[in-house]
Image (cartoon, coloured by chain):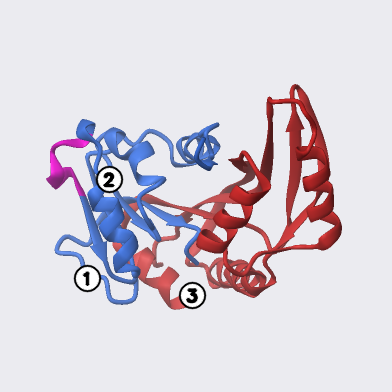
Chain colours: A red, B blue
Amino acid sequence: MVHALEKIRRLLRPGGVLVDIHPPPEPSSIDVRIGGQLHPVGWLRDTDDYGDYEAADAALATIVARGLFTVERQGAFSFLTHVDTPAELRRYLAEEWENASIDDVTTARIEEWMSTSERDKEIILRESVRIARLAPIPKA
Amino acid sequence: MPVRTDPEDSEATALFDFAGDLAGKRVLEIGCGDGRLTWRYADRAARVVAIDPDADEIAIAQEDLPPSLARRDRVVFKAVSIQDFEPVEPVFDVVILSWAL
């Protein structure tokens, strides 16, 4: 990862910027929305990826410590995925997020809320994603 | 309804906030996948090179090229990792690491 960042530095013109977007090594929250109300039901975990995200943080820290980049700004945003049924959620996870897991309690809560007769309802996955703007530091 | 990924456009909004004005800029996106984010900013940039090592994802991105970006040479997708990527003109104003580190 550090090598990739070194290469990116070579590809950036002076005055250019690197924008890094990646999730933190934390579970995503799951809500069920029924009408105008959000009901927190639990978490989705993808522990296989957490090591990668921690390594990404470490690589960024390394290139900053080595004086190759400086962090100009950091922030976060919520990245939401909306699905209409528990079956659709299972399909989506199987196809797009194969290492993700949802514990039995959360699954039961989803099924319970989604079984209500209200028609305006959906399941919402919420990832808190980090974003940072870094600028290359010119060689002395 | 199908699965809706970021219909709020939060990712692109954050990108514009952090990357600044992309007008006239050459952008390299690393980890573009199927182009989900690429299409949300590409029309603002002068040129976009979007790479991902997954050839299947790149094929989807090329297939999904929106009509609004009919000038295909403005956005180029390449199935390659950053390690193996050797651009003809190795100068970019903005590099986006899209969930890729």
At a point 37% along the width and 65% down the height, the residue shown is A8
Which amino acid, by three-letter code, is at mark 3?
Met
Q: Which residue is mark 2?
A: B64
- Residue B74 counted in the magenta span: yes
Span colored in magenta: B69-75
- Secondary-structure class at tag 3: loop
Q: Is residue A137 above or below residue B85?
A: above
Which amino acid, by three-letter code, is at mark 2?
Asp
How far across and down, in percent of the image, does residue B91 sit?
24, 57
| Label 1 Cα crowd, 10 Å radius (few <14 / some 14-19 / many 20+) | few
Q: Marks 1 and 3, Cα distance to the nearest angstrom? A: 17 Å
Tell me, yes or no, if residue A57 can be seen here: yes
Q: Marks 3 and 2, Cα distance to the nearest angstrom? A: 30 Å
Chain ID at mark 3: A
Q: Quadrant of residue A77?
A: top right
Which amino acid, by three-letter code, is at mark 1?
Glu
- Residue A136 in the figure: left or right of residue B67: right
- Residue B52 counted in the magenta span: no
Q: Nearer the viewer, mark 1 or mark 2?
A: 2
Chain ID at mark 2: B
- Residue A1 circle label: 3
Q: Quadrant of residue B90?
A: bottom left
Q: Which residue is mark 1?
A: B86
Viewer-side residue, A130 vs B80: B80
